[in-house]
Each structure stands twice: as C-alpha cells, then as structure tokens.
Image (cartoon, grey):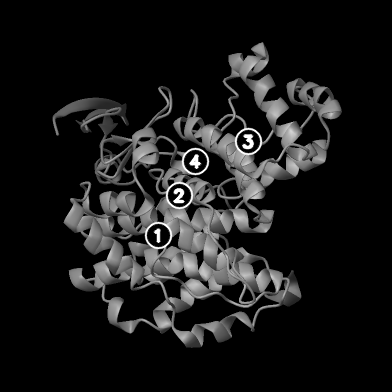
C-alpha cells in the first residue's frame, strides 16, 4: 500500500491525516487518530463513507458493475466453478488444485449431518414459525453442541468451525423447510454435490425416490455462488462486529442471520415476489409503472436498481440466464406472476425512465422468480440466502480474527439528548 496525506483545517489548526491506497478502489483517509488529535468525531450515518476494516476477500465497483472474489470476476466463477470451489477460494484466498478440491469437498461432505439431539429443537417451535426464526435459534445453538471448535485463538478450531458451518447450514435450512411444511426430515446423501444434496433434503420424501434434476441443481448452485459474499454489507458487518468482541463463530453467524432477515437486506427477493403478486396480471403493469414514476406516490418497484450498483448488477446477468433456463426446463408458461415478471423485465430494459434512472432488474428480482419456480415458498427465500452467505460471513470473520490490527467495534455518536440534570423525587414531578 502507498501512503500520502490529506489536510484538515479544524479548531484553528491544520491536521495531517494519512491517505491509504488499496490494490484497487478509492483511496481511504485514515481518521483513526482524529479524536485523539482534534477532540472531534466524524458523522457518517450508515457508515456509507467509512471503511470499517481492511479486507482482501471481495471488491465491488458499483459504478462499473464489477464484483470480484479474490480478484476473480463473479460471472466467471458462476459460469465455470461450483459452490464449494468458491467456498475454498473465499476461505483460503486461491482456487484449489484438483487434490485440494477433492479434500475440501470430502471434509464438507463429512460434516453435513447435525447432532441428532438437534432434531428435538424443531418441535419446540410453533408449526407455523417463520423459517428464519428457526434458523436464528438453531444456528445459535450449534455452540452448545460443538464445544471443540469454539476457541477462536486456535487456528485449527477456527477452520473446523468454518467447515462445520458451511456443511451444516444447508441441512439446518432443509430441516427448517420440512418442519415448516409438516414433512419428515431427510438426511444428507454423501454421493450428491452441495446443491443437489440441498434440493434432495428439501424435496425428497421417504415414500418414493427423488431424482435431482441437473438443470435445477445447477441453477441452485449458481444462486449459492452469486450470494456467497458481497463485501461489507449489513449482515457481514454484523458478523464482524459480533466477532470483534470474541464471540464464538456460531453466535456470530446467528447474528448475521438475524440481520439478513430484514426486508431491506436479505428479504429483498421476497419483497420482489410479493410485488409481482400484488400486480397480479400483465394488464395492471401500466398502472404500477405510472405509480413508480410518480414522485408523490410512495410505491416502489422492488427488485430494480441497487444501493451499491449504479450500473447493471453483474450477478443479475447470470441470474437472468439461469431464470430462463429453469423456466424452460420446467415448461412453465401459464403462470400469471411469471408473465408479469417477464413483461416488467422487458419494460425495465427498454423504457427511457428506467434506463435514465439505472433501475435495472437486480439479482433479487431474478432469484425470487427462480426460487418460486423451483418450488420454494417465499418464506424460504432469505433462508437460502443465509445458506449461500455463510461462507462469506465465516471468511470475513476468519480474516478479522487473524488481523493483528482488529479491535472491538465501538462506533461513536452525535449526542442530541438532554444535558446533565438533577434527579427529582417522584412526589415532586
């Protein structure tokens, strides 16, 4: 990294601040010593102009529509790789050799089962409990079962915990789904790959054989790859913040799941599908397009545009192709909701208003349609996001733990409450 300086005029003095440059991306003004030197904080709601850490995992250029994992473009990884290969890349920093890939696949596969006593947890939830509520509880409870991988100071235990989380998350998610629909749990099958095994656990039943459709399994694989990591988003920052206190990795990932549950984050694809359902029929699209263009109408088209990407979401390009592959494989032609989605997609890519505002269909728009076609209810969408994002969370957590400069997170505030006042006895209030 190269260093230069920036000058700040404050309090009648000039203060020099280091400017750091990463391997790619905007420069960063280092304000770590600002309070000590000036007695002042910075004010940055949502930390949208603040680098909270130094990381070598994921790079995003929202203006150019670029997403790189360890330097590799997301479209290349999704087109040519599989999910566990991407997991290895995020965890270890390089793509695996054939021997390394075989060993990693075996280690993940051998950890997919969960402790049998954990099955009893599910019966403690109401039968209509939201699957994300179940995920928060069950994942948080993993630390009660796997004491031998909670010592964060031990590199071996950190890696064992990482493998366990990647391996067990789809099993727990499938169990949450089965509990949600009232079907018996289905155990993992070691001969299936990560995505196919997940589909089998979700859709197989004991009374008949279930063969995983390779086209659908590949679509599931791409969904997992495209959601594996996305830099310092809300849930990843939550995992890092929880981990900065020294909390065990299972608790940190449970915190990430809780944050992901928010409709502004992981629930966006569910919100997009809810919007398609609200529109209901292609005949009503002009009405909703007009509402979206009306500045005085609070209605927003969900699944269009992105907070980070001011250009086309690079993940959406792959997801668009995958969506149409799934619809073609399943022969879905007469679904009104999908008709609405396809027409909205056409309008967004050709209408001048959408093009000018850069309101392109994003990954949430396409993934919601695909997951519905695969047979998942909307309540499961964020759960599937959590399955995919676990490797990103655990890679970011591991990087943070191994960073010699990491400290416990402690944001500051701009206090606007009452100044000091004396306590008044209740009889005199």
Task: Rate crowding at label 4 as few (under 14), some (14 to 19) or many (20 or more) other CA atoms within 10 Å.
Answer: few
Q: Which mark is residue 193?
A: 1
- Image height check: is 417 above or below 312? below
Q: Nearer the viewer, mark 1 or mark 3?
A: 1
Pinpoint residue 80: horizontal percent, then vertical percent: 34, 39
Q: Residue at the spot x=65%, y=47% of the render?
A: 373
> Which dot, 2 or 3, sits closer to the camera?
2
Q: Residue at x 67, y 66 (%)?
A: 130
Under circle 4, the secondary element is helix
Front one among 55 and 120: 120
- Which residue occupies 35% across, 68% down? 109
Foreground: disc 2 or disc 1: 1
Q: Earlier in the sequence, mark 1 or mark 3?
A: 1
Q: Position of residue 323 (x, y in %)?
A: 58, 38
Q: Give the labeled residue for mark 2.
A: 221
The residue closer to the viewer here, 66 or 261, is 66
């Amino acid at each position: 990294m190269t260093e230069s300086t920036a000058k700040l005029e404050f309090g009648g003095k000039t203060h020099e601040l280091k400017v750091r440059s990463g391997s790619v991306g905007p420069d960063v003004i280092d304000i770590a010593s600002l309070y000590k030197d000036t007695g002042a904080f910075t004010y940055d709601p949502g930390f949208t102009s603040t680098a909270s850490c130094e990381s070598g995992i994921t790079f995003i250029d929202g203006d150019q529509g670029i997403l790189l994992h360890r330097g590799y473009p997301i479209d290349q990884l999704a087109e040519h790789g599989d999910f566990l290969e991407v997991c290895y890349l995020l965890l270890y920093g390089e793509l695996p050799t054939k021997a390394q890939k075989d060993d990693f696949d075996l280690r993940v596969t051998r950890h997919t089962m969960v402790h049998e006593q954990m099955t009893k947890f599910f019966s403690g939830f109401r039968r209509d409990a939201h699957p994300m509520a179940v995920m928060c509880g069950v994942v948080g409870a993993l630390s009660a079962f796997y004491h031998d991988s909670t010592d964060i100071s031990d590199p071996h235990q950190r890696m064992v915990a990482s493998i366990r989380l990647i391996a067990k998350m789809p099993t727990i998610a499938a169990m949450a789904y089965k509990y949600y629909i009232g079907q018996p749990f289905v155990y993992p099958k070691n001969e299936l790959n990560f995505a196919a095994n997940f589909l089998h656990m979700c859709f197989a039943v004991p009374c008949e054989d279930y063969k995983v459709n390779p086209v659908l399994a590949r679509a599931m694989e791409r969904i997992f790859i495209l959601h594996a990591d996305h830099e310092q988003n809300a849930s990843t920052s939550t995992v890092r913040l929880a981990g900065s206190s020294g909390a065990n990795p299972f608790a940190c990932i449970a915190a990430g799941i809780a944050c992901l549950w928010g409709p502004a984050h992981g629930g966006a694809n569910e919100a997009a599908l809810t919007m398609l359902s609200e529109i209901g029929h292609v005949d009503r699209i002009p009405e909703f397009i007009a509402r979206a263009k009306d500045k005085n109408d609070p209605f927003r088209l969900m699944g269009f545009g992105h907070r980070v990407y001011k250009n086309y979401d690079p993940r959406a390009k792959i997801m668009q192709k995958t969506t149409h592959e799934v619809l073609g494989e399943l022969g879905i032609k007469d679904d009104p909701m999908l008709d609405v989605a396809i027409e909205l997609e056409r309008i967004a890519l050709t209408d001048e208003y959408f093009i000018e505002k850069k309101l392109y269909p994003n990954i949430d728009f396409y993934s919601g349609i695909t997951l519905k076609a695969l047979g998942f209810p909307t309540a499961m969408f964020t759960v599937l996001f959590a399955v995919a994002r676990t490797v990103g969370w655990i890679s970011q957590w591991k990087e943070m733990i191994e960073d010699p400069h990491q400290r416990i997170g402690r944001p500051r505030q701009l206090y606007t409450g009452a100044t000091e006042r004396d306590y008044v006895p209740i009889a005199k209030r």
